[in-house]
Image (cartoon, helix red, strand yellow):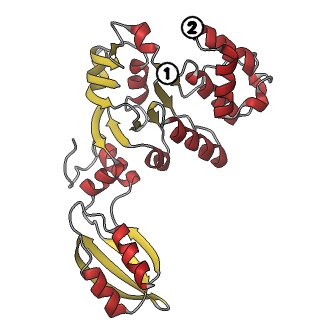
Amino acid sequence: MIEVQNLTKRYGSNYAVRDISFQVEEGEILGFLGPNGAGKSTTMNILTGYLSATDGIVKVNGHDVLEEPNEAKANIGYLPEQPPLYLDMTVREYLSFMYDLKRCRLDRQQHIAEICRLVKIENVYGRLIKNLSKGYRQRVGLAQALIGNPPVLILDEPTVGLDPNQIIEIRSLIKKLGKHHTIILSSHILQEIEAVCDRIIIISQGELVADDTAAHLSRRYSDDRRLLARIMGPEADVLSLLSHLPGVEKAVSLGEREPGVIEYALDPKEDADVRRDLFDRLASRGWPLMGLKSMEMSLEDIFILLTRERLPGAPASKKGGTN
């Protein structure tokens, strides 16, 4: 659906983006991460045709953004960090204006009404945009991106400035949209990226430093893949079960952590996910699983590792390389 090959953007001798390549498959939600100044917004502006690249190729649904800009842009709905709103228009006037600007051929009234229901702005449809809250303005910006039902959505910090409840609502909406659209999502909220996205790209100083799922990145960069499980049950029997659990190399009892509850350390084999099997076997014996946590690195830990180490004077990483 989206293909980026050797993309480079240079301003004089300074590189905003340097030779990055990636693909986004149809129906995929891709998280796009990087520190401030890493080149995220530059890349998104090139993908949407707002900026030209110095070198490289960008294709959207088979259309080259440089050679076929109109065809490529027709496949994209874009929500920049600052939504392109006309504050003195009502929501109705603005969405109708964007409908005309995009030369949409769907039934105007039905299409706009459907979008308003989807993003939940029916109750402010007749209000001036300047009188709306930040959350509603963000929803109106998302509504304009959806006009024409573009197969690709590019969302740059869609939840910036929103309160926790609004963030949860927008996050849920993005997941829902991912069932019918290919989405690139940029956000500084790492928990949001981890919760919503199928795959994650991290760029630093204009270069791509990681491209994988959150789970695979965690396994790749973690020295300790151990699981800590707190289980209520007879210690010797529980330990025997854990030791013979498929995918577990070693299980050790760490002693009682609360009355009647023993903590165990499990060392899984490489690429083994023992959680479901562990739960099923404990449940069948009536031994409550009181807690389970992983010692693997979080996405935040990985982000810091891959971006901080590239800053001038930063210590070199002792961990493995990137893609």
- Specify whether 70 is left or right of 116: left
- Specify whether 254 is left or right of 80: left
Above or below, comparing residue 243 to residue 321 in the picture: below
Q: Nearer the viewer, residue 135 or 38?
A: 135
What amino acid type is highlighted by mark number 1?
A: Pro
Q: Quadrant of residue 62?
A: top left
Mark 1 — residue?
Answer: 150
Total marks drawn? 2
Q: Secondary structure at mark 1?
A: loop
Q: Secondary structure at mark 2?
A: loop
From the top left corner, tell me how far across and down residue 84 is, in percent.
60, 19
Above or below, comparing residue 196 to residue 282 in the picture: above
Above or below, comparing residue 220 to residue 114 in the picture: below
Report how far apart the C-alphas of labels 1 and 2 lie in the structure.
12 Å
Residue shown at 45% from the left, 18% from the top: 75
Residue shown at 66% from the left, 27% from the top: 114
Q: Quadrant of residue 102?
A: top right
Q: Nearer the viewer, residue 92 or 155?
A: 92
What amino acid type is highlighted by mark number 2?
A: Arg
Above or below, comparing residue 67 to residue 190 in the picture: above
Q: Quadrant of the N terminus?
A: top left
Mark 2 — residue?
Answer: 103
From the top left corner, tell me how far across and down residue 304 is, in percent.
36, 49
